Image (spheres, rainbow, N blue to C red):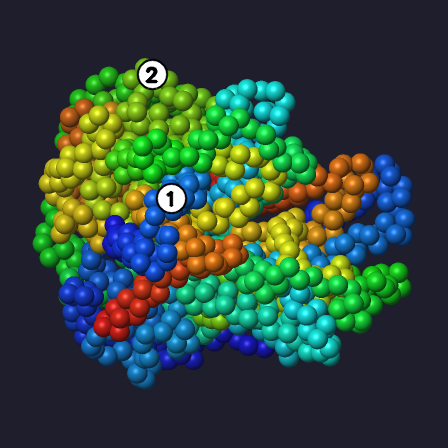
């Protein structure tokens, strides 16, 4: 009977993984120039830094996707063999990505043991495999049935399966890359308990995150990267928040949430009794010109579903949506757009952008009809408009004809914003506008939203980041399990009552 | 009791099997001759070739690929087997020729899909035509007649074992072999993984290219060897042998639960699907539908099969957020 | 965008020049005006359908039923005319048949949600089967000369066949719409990322339905051309034409993955196909050789770009790994 003992990895406190002075260039671009990381057994180690700081490249080097140009990597004292994901796994590195990729048609047990199913002779030993999987899930404190198919599993459960997989291959280092982005707070707690268990058994856990509160809640040690190099490392007790931010950004960010006070005008959007089978029901609210409404709540509360229904990506079953007095047809995003709505979606890579297309083409896709003369597109107008928006948004790029997948996350988000602001919408909906974006660009986006509101735009902001919600919104609407359960004005809202309403510990409305 | 039924229905092959039973019952009542021994033998004999090809095709479809060249391959192989036999070659040599042809086509298809990473639709569509074209060149107007067919093959085509046609028995044996492989061998489970999530399968260390290549070689090889079965079935072969079979094979697989999207389905389902479609075809004949409508009906059946498959797999509803009992 | 397709288009145009020159010098009778007229007639139907098929493939779909739809249009014309309908109206009937075939495909893909590959394999059989159901084994051979002469004669005073008018007019329309209008841009967007297209306010389902309808309509137009050219409607006409269409489109630089391709690449590719066919025929290769060549071209059209991609990726990996 195989046991997934991690406690014999190394004595707690001794180094498990050391990366020293790693450099890596792609073409002429230096992604890493002197990145270092020391992981000890029995520790949860946060890796932080702005977008473009090199975290992702460092992790990919560790995972075997890249081979470093120079520098040393040693695992438990031995030289780590680079350049192969298979070898990385065999040497004991496991990476849990933000969106894990399971095999939807295979059972959970098969997912854990994919490619290396236990065998009796030549035949797969199904019962042993399922028992082992059960045991692993039990060890992680999760009740999942090993014979169910992976299709339809929540992201949180998928991550647990990935962790079980890591345990079954006796991983010595488990890397969690932005794991909490799509998790509800109950699921985050569960994940953190799992991480602490792993740590207590002697594993080394790397936790990559932008969320300062989570890092301070969970981690023991923090390493900060900036511009491809490690700029500092210290224990959670040594580094306080301002010091941490300063290390990440290299400058002081005084004004994270530049909110301009605006007197709200006429009602722009009126949502009455909106419902969609199984997803949300009885949603009623209004947004006035110049207002920024935050739609907050736990992940999975139904906020994105509501705004997608308002914009017409999905069809709503009951209720009505009115924009400036005009009733909006359900399920027709083209018409919603024409009426003056805009939606910056949650997933910019999959939903917001055409990654292989140029900045110019991405910016213009929403306003093509405006760039024509006699029915034919004028490419010169397209380029000029894109360049104009690029300037307004302070977009950093080399050539307007470069494809957007060359841009950093923050700049990509700016392109999505550009394409929608160009339509001169009366109502702008932004879904997690600053997720996965570095601190510097974050404040630029906030400033932009404030400015547009000041010019009379009505804005709905779906956000899971409480500081953002409290800093930017005129009113905070709280959703929980498909229902609108709370509303707070700017003066009233504070972290305690918003979170309590979101989790249901206060009975409200 | 209800939960047993519910669990049974979760098995993909059960609804198809029930549909088969239903079709046979309905047609039998309309035309009692359908129920006779010869009626059943008609179905099983008629379906043997498609059933064999469907078992082979299931290996490929499960990976989210497709092999449209099987019709050309089996036809060409049947012809070559007949030619070699008419030249006096021993049976084992004739079969080897057919097998080698099939493996050759499979190797070419497999190489292009697995290593050059070309879409299997395009690759096998062109092999379909290239192989058929070469076949036409080689065959010209020649026809293999029943005197050219090896006697053992003729025998298999015409006789029964315990009332079951030998050809169908071959299909059943292949089905069981294929089914056991797909369930119990590691490398076969990899095929399901590849079809279920292609990018992830490379990341978990599955040798994707090698698996895809092997699957195409197997499909090709089986199609080649099955040329003997085609020859046995019709006792003749010519330049148009096997024409259009790929359509029926794909339909049989889809109907039998081997979804085009990959990741699910078994050789058992493929064969049940083939039998169901054959039963429907014969049923329509027994109910008086004219021959000319045959191809049109085939088309409708395939479309219906795909629609049903889509309906069944779309039972995954959008994410449930609200509590069921408020 | 994808810089390789740019080079590929030019490559095909270059190839066209090369094979034409080789043909003119190497094969007697090739360079005559009669032969040029013949080539244009020969690829007429394929080019017309290829124009519409390019849009479909760029948008990430495919239609394998076009040859059957073409022939069903032809069969409709034959049956209507045989039953006393004036030929002009029979032609209209043929066009409507093509359009309906396309709409059915479009409905099954965009409304029912089926995959176009599998569905159009089914409608390929269905439409072809309907040809047999309509005509039995009897082709319709009696057709008014005033019409059929359009099928085989040249425009008075030139050596261009009448079908050239259709080729030029439709070619221009499809070209301009794809590259210079918002609609064309949206089609390309759908091909690159259908999800993002949906989120950008593009009516994806409606657009795809229109593309299937257009493909069906062009199959109908091709059906009319085919009927006039052969002055008959038979149940087994145009078998295998879908291969030539798809081969021409893919060989013209349109990527089967969607989102990439230009129409003039497709036009050049169709002409290459026509020239190669002519060369083979004049050199006394059988009609069968044509089948093999079309299959080979189809293969080359996907192998070549992929092989160069792999070579370039291999070089890049060596330099950075």
Find residue A323 and report its horizontal and vertical position in percent: 32, 20
**Residue located at (61% from left, 39% from top):** C235
Describe residue B9's horizontal placement relative to residue A12 as left or right: right
Identify the residue under disc 1. C34
Describe residue C281's horizontal placement relative to residue A18 as left or right: right
Tell me how far mark 2 sits from mark 1, CA to CA.
64 Å
**Residue located at (21% from left, 77% from top):** A71
Identify the residue under disc 2. A326
Which of the image's four quarters has the N terminus of chain A?
bottom right
Q: Quadrant of residue B98?
A: bottom right
**Residue located at (36% from left, 52% from top):** C30
Q: Is C153 situated above or below B280?
A: above
Residue A420 visible within the image: no
Same subunit, labels 2 and 1: the answer reads: no
Which residue extends farthest top?
A325
Find residue C290 and report its horizontal and vertical position in percent: 48, 55
Total tally of numbered discs in the picture: 2
* Mark 2, secondary structure of its residue: strand
Q: Is B99 situated above or below B31?
A: below
Q: Quadrant of residue C194?
A: top left
The dot on residue C137 is none
Find residue C47 and report its horizontal and vertical position in percent: 40, 42
Q: Is C86 situated above or below C138?
A: above
Q: Is C37 situated above or below A111?
A: above
Residue B234 visible within the image: yes
The foreground one among C207 and A11 is C207
**Residue located at (37% from left, 21% from top):** A328
Describe residue A357's horizontal placement relative to residue B191 as left or right: left
Instruction: Give the crowd class for mark 2: few <14, some 14-19, many >=20 residues within 10 Å.
Output: few
| Chain of the residue under label 2 | A
| Chain of the residue under label 1 | C
Describe residue C46's horizontal placement relative to residue A383 as left or right: right
């Amino acid at each position: 009977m195989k046991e997934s003992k991690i406690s014999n990895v190394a004595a707690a406190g001794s180094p498990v993984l050391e990366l020293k002075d790693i450099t890596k260039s792609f073409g002429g671009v230096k992604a890493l120039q002197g990145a270092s990381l020391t992981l000890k057994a029995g520790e949860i180690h946060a890796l932080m830094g702005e977008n473009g700081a090199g975290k992702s490249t460092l992790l990919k080097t560790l995972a075997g996707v890249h081979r470093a140009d120079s520098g040393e990597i040693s695992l438990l004292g031995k030289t780590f063999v680079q350049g192969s994901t298979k070898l990385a796994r065999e040497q004991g590195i496991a990476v849990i990505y933000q969106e894990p990729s399971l095999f939807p048609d295979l059972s959970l047990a098969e997912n854990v043991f994919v490619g290396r199913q236990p065998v009796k002779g030549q035949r797969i030993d199904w019962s042993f495999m399922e028992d082992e999987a059960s045991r692993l899930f039990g060890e992680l404190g999760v009740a999942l049935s090993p014979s169910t198919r992976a299709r339809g599993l929540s992201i949180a459960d998928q991550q647990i399966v990935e962790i079980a997989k890591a345990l079954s291959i006796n991983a010595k280092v488990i890397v969690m890359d932005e794991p909490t982005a799509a998790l509800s707070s109950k699921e985050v707690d569960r994940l953190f308990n799992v991480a602490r268990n792993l740590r207590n058994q002697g594993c080394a856990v790397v936790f990559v995150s932008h969320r300062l509160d989570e890092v301070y809640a969970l981690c023991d040690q923090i390493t900060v990267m900036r511009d491809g190099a490690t700029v500092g490392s210290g224990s959670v007790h040594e580094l306080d928040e301002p010091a941490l931010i300063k290390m990440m950004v290299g400058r002081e960010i005084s004004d994270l949430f530049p909110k301009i006070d605006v007197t709200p005008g006429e009602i722009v959007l009126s949502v009455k009794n909106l419902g969609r089978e199984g997803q949300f029901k009885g949603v009623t609210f209004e947004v006035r010109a110049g207002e920024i409404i935050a739609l907050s709540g736990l992940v999975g509360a139904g906020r994105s579903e509501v705004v997608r229904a308002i914009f017409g990506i999905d069809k709503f079953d009951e209720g009505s949506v009115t924009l400036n007095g005009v009733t909006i047809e359900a399920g027709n995003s083209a018409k919603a757009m024409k009426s003056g709505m805009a939606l910056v979606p949650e997933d910019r890579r999959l939903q917001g952008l055409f990654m292989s297309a140029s900045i110019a083409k991405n910016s213009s896709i929403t306003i093509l009809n405006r760039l024509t003369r006699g029915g034919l597109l004028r490419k010169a107008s397209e380029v000029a408009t894109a360049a104009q928006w690029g300037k307004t948004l302070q977009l950093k790029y080399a050539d307007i004809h470069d494809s957007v997948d060359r841009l950093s996350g923050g700049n990509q988000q700016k392109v999505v914003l550009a394409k929608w602001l160009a339509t001169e919408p009366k109502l702008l909906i932004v879904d997690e506008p600053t997720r996965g974006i570095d601190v510097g660009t974050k404040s630029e986006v906030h400033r932009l939203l404030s400015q547009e509101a000041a010019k009379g735009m009505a804005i709905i902001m779906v956000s899971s980041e409480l500081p953002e919600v409290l800093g930017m919104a005129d009113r905070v609407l709280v959703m929980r399990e498909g229902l609108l359960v709370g509303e707070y004005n700017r003066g009233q809202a504070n972290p305690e009552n918003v979170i309590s309403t979101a989790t249901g510990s206060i009975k409200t409305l | 009791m209800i939960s047993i039924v519910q669990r049974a229905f979760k098995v993909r092959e059960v609804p198809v099997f029930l549909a088969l039973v239903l079709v046979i019952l309905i047609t039998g009542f309309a035309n009692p001759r359908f129920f006779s021994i010869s009626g059943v033998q008609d179905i099983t004999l008629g379906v043997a070739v498609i059933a064999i090809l469907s078992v082979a095709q299931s290996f490929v479809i499960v990976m989210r690929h497709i092999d449209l060249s099987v019709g050309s391959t089996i036809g060409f192989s049947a012809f070559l087997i007949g030619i070699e036999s008419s030249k006096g070659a021993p049976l084992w040599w004739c079969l080897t020729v057919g097998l080698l042809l099939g493996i050759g086509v499979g190797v070419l298809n497999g190489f292009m899909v697995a290593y050059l990473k070309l879409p299997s639709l395009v690759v096998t569509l062109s092999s379909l035509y290239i192989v058929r074209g070469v076949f036409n060149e080689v065959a010209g107007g020649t026809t293999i007649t029943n005197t050219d067919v090896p006697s053992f093959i003729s025998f298999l085509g015409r006789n029964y074992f315990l009332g079951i046609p030998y050809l169908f028995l071959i299909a059943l044996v292949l089905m069981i072999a294929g089914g056991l492989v797909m369930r119990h061998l590691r490398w076969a489970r990899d095929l399901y993984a590849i079809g279920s999530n292609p990018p992830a399968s490379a990341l978990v260390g599955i040798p994707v290219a090698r698996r895809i290549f092997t699957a195409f070689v197997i499909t090709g090889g089986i199609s080649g060897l099955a040329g003997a079965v085609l020859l046995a079935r019709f006792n003749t072969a010519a330049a148009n042998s096997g024409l259009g079979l790929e359509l029926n094979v794909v339909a049989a697989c889809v109907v039998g639960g081997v979804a085009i999207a990959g990741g699910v389905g078994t050789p058992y389902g493929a064969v049940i699907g083939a039998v169901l479609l054959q039963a429907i075809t014969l049923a329509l004949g027994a109910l008086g539908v004219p021959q000319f409508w045959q191809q049109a009906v085939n088309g409708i059946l395939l479309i219906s099969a795909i629609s049903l498959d889509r309906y069944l797999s779309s039972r995954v509803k959008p994410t449930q957020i609200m509590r069921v009992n408020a | 965008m994808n810089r390789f397709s740019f080079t590929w288009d030019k490559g095909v145009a270059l190839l066209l020049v090369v094979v034409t020159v080789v043909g003119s010098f190497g094969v007697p009778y090739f360079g005559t005006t009669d032969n040029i007229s013949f080539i244009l007639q020969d690829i007429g139907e394929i080019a017309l359908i290829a124009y519409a098929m390019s849009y479909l493939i760029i948008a990430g779909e495919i239609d394998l039923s076009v040859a059957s739809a073409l022939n069903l249009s032809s069969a409709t014309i034959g049956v209507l005319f045989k039953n006393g309908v004036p030929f002009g109206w029979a032609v209209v009937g043929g066009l409507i048949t093509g359009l309906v075939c396309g709409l059915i495909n479009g409905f099954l893909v965009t409304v029912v949600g089926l995959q176009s590959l599998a569905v159009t394999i089914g409608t390929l059989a269905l439409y072809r089967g309907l040809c047999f159901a309509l005509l039995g084994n009897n082709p319709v051979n009696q057709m008014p000369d005033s019409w059929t002469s359009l099928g085989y004669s040249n425009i008075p005073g030139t050596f261009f066949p009448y079908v050239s008018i259709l080729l030029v007019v439709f070619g221009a329309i499809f070209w301009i719409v794809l590259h210079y209008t918002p609609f064309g841009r949206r089609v390309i967007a759908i091909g690159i990322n259908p999800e993002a297209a949906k989120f950008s306010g593009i009516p994806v389902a409606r657009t795809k339905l229109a593309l299937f309808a257009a493909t069906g309509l062009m199959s109908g137009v091709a059906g009319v051309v085919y009927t006039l050219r052969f002055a008959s409607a038979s149940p087994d006409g145009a078998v295998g034409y879908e291969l030539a269409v798809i081969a021409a489109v893919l060989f013209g630089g349109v990527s089967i993955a969607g989102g990439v391709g230009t129409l003039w690449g497709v036009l050049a590719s169709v002409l290459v196909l026509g020239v190669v066919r002519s060369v083979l025929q004049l050199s006394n290769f059988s009609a069968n050789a044509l089948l093999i060549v079309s299959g080979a071209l189809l293969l080359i059209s996907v192998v070549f770009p992929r092989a160069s991609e792999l070579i370039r990726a291999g070089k890049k990996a060596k330099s950075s790994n």
